[in-house]
Structures are given as structure tokens and as C-alpha cells.
Image (cartoon, rainbow, N blue to C red):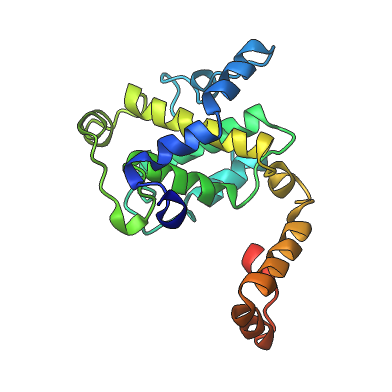
């Protein structure tokens, strides 16, 4: 049933956390010499969230307004801050990867799933946790326990994707693996969905249309 229909919404985010072994990954970082607790990386509650206008911070800042701009959460200040804190923390922990456009949308969908009982569809936005609604959405407390826990899980999923699922080669400078993955995607499309492949070929659309 799971193979045919997928993991039920309410278990989906937890399933991803378990499959990617994010808690083991976090513990491994804590045992190293790296200062890698998300609570430290996200910044102090006494310092307002702010990004520099230049460099990778400037790139993140510009992309915050471009990420699902019509969604009520990401159009809000707390939504932008939440996404920005996670993306900035990723760069601080993985400077060899830095920030790449595309990270923001992956991170945003993960956030929607975490906030919305595993449902990442923007049209189905309806957070259901009473304490999250009360302490975060109503009180606008960006440092409440509930949102820190969610941010932390999303952050470690992103780090797991970078370290263990090949996304480092997609997101790092030069996007070295993008061309290879695009060619693999299009070959799979030819093999698995030849009708679609012929249709796209007829429109002179290649794999890079979907990946760049």
C-alpha cells in the first residue's frame, strides 16, 4: 500500500526524518569538533534576524521574496525569517556547498510539511497543532520551542540530503552533477515514459528545461 499510495500525510515528515537518520547525523556532528547545534547556528533570540545584502546572504535575502510569494506563510515576515534562518544555518555548517538557488524551494516544501501534518501542498495549508498556533502564529514568537524544533528537523534533513543523498554535487558551486543527473533523468524518461519523451522532443524541449 505504501509503495502504491505513499506514506500517509500525518506520518510523512516523521518518516523522512527516520529514513534520513537525522538524529544520528546530529549526534555525529555534536561528537565532532564542529559547533553544530542548530540552536547556536540559528542565532540568538536577542538579535533580530537580518541578512547581509552581499554575497551568499544577499542571495538568500533576494530569494526569500521569490519563494512561494503568494503563500500566506512565506509572504509573512515570520515565514521569511524561518526559511532564512534555516538556509543561513546550512551555509554556516556546510560552507563548501554554500547557498544555491533551488535550496529555498526544497526547504520551503519541507517546512510546509512539518508545519502542516505532513501535507506540503500550498493549497492545503492549515496548521493543526494548537501549541504551534498559539505560541508561534498568534504570539509571533519566533523563538518558541515548537518552531525551533521544526526548524531543526528541516535543517538536518537538508544536511542529510547534502551529505548522504548526493545533493552536494547539485547544490555546490559549479553544480557539477547537474548535467549528469539531467542526462540520467532524460534517459529514464525515454525508457519509462516514451510517449512524453517523444512529445517533448517534438517541442525541442530537453532535460535541462526541467532542471535549470
Residue found at the far front of this picture: 1
Image location (x, y in percent) of residue 169: 74, 46
The mark total stands at 0
Q: Nearer the viewer, residue 89 or 171?
A: 171
In the rendered structure, the answer to whether residue 133 lies left or right of residue 117 reads left
In the rendered structure, the answer to whether residue 93 lies left or right of residue 75 reads right
Q: Is residue 189 visible?
A: yes
Residue in the image at 54% along x and 30% along y? 156
Q: Nearer the viewer, residue 39 or 167?
A: 167
Q: Image quarter for residue 88? A: top right
Q: Nearer the viewer, residue 5 or 11?
A: 5
Image location (x, y in percent) of residue 155: 52, 33
Quadrant housing the C terminus: bottom right
Residue in the image at 77% along x and 52% along y? 177
Location of residue 202 with respect to 121 vertically, above or below: below
In the rendered structure, the answer to whether residue 207 lies left or right of residue 15 reads right
Q: Is residue 49 visible?
A: no
Image location (x, y in percent) of residue 67: 47, 53
Q: Image quarter for residue 114? A: top left
Residue in the image at 55% along x and 18% along y? 37
Residue found at the far bottom of this picture: 202
Q: Nearer the viewer, residue 2 or 198?
A: 2
Residue in the image at 65% along x and 47% along y? 100
Amino acid at each position: 500500500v505504501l509503495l502504491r499510495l505513499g506514506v500517509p500525510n500525518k506520518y510523512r515528515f516523521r518518516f523522512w526524518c527516520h529514513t534520513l537518520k537525522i538524529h544520528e547525523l546530529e549526534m555525529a556532528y555534536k561528537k565532532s569538533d564542529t559547533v553544530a547545534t542548530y540552536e547556536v547556528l540559528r542565532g540568538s533570540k536577542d538579535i533580530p534576524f537580518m541578512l547581509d545584502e552581499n554575497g551568499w546572504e544577499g542571495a538568500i535575502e533576494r530569494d526569500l521574496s521569490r519563494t512561494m510569494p503568494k503563500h500566506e506563510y512565506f509572504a509573512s515576515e515570520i515565514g521569511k525569517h524561518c526559511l532564512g534562518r534555516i538556509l543561513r544555518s546550512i551555509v554556516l555548517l556546510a560552507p563548501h556547498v554554500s547557498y544555491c538557488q533551488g535550496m529555498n524551494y526544497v526547504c520551503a516544501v519541507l517546512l510546509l510539511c512539518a508545519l502542516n501534518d505532513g501535507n506540503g501542498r500550498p493549497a492545503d495549508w492549515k496548521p493543526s497543532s494548537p501549541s504551534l498556533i498559539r505560541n508561534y502564529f498568534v504570539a509571533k514568537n519566533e523563538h518558541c520551542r515548537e518552531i525551533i524544533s521544526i526548524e531543526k528537523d528541516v535543517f538536518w534533513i537538508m544536511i542529510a540530503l547534502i551529505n548522504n543523498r548526493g545533493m552536494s554535487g547539485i547544490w555546490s558551486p559549479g553544480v557539477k552533477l547537474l548535467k549528469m543527473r539531467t542526462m540520467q533523468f532524460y534517459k529514464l524518461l525515454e525508457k519509462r515514459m516514451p510517449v512524453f519523451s517523444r512529445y517533448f522532443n517534438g517541442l525541442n524541449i530537453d532535460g535541462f528545461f526541467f532542471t535549470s
